[in-house]
Amino acid sequence: MSFGGHVLDMIKRTNANNALREKYRAKKDKTTNNRWKSEVNDKISEEKEISEEELERIKSAIRSKLRKEQLKQNILIYSICIALSFLLFCWIYFS
């Protein structure tokens, strides 16, 4: 028996996938280039200027939000560990 048909099918699928990949890559490049270009003169727009105080305020807000999330996660993890250790102790003590 021959397996040439399977190999030919794999080659065709690879070529079809490459064609689709190039199509979507061109579409993605077109949208990302348009996002960063100005509509008036097609030049890359400059980044928005933010003052140092505003930047520090944004950073501190992000840090405080992360601290709160980490605290919630730690409380959840520790409470689960305490509950499991209590259940393990009860299981060992009453067995």
Image (cartoon, rainbow, N blue to C red):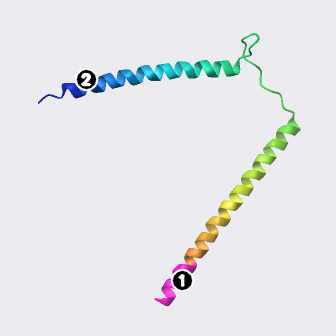
Query: Per the image, is 92 magenta?
Result: yes
Spatial CA span between label 1 and label 2: 63 Å
Mark 1 or 2, which is nearer the eye? 2
The residue positioned 52% from the left and 80% from the top of the image is: 88
As drawn, 58 above or below 33: below
Q: Residue at x 46, y 23 (%)?
A: 21
Query: Is 69 rendered above or below residue 13?
Result: below
| Residue neighbourhood size for the residue with mark 2, other residues' Cα within 10 Å, grouped as few (<14), some (14–19), many (≥20) | few
Q: Position of residue 2 (x, y in %)?
A: 14, 28
Q: Quadrant of residue 8?
A: top left
Say above or below: 2 vs 85.
Answer: above
Location of residue 34 (image quadrant): top right
Instruction: Read off the residue under disc 1.
Output: 89
Task: Tell me the kind of residue under disc 2.
Answer: Leu
Q: Which residues are magenta?
A: 86-95
> Looking at the image, which residue is at 21% across and 25% down?
5
Q: How packed is label 1: few (under 14 Cα within 10 Å), some, or many (20 or more)?
A: few
What secondary structure prevails in the magenta region?
helix
Residue on which the image places disc 2: 8
Q: Secondary structure at mark 2?
A: helix
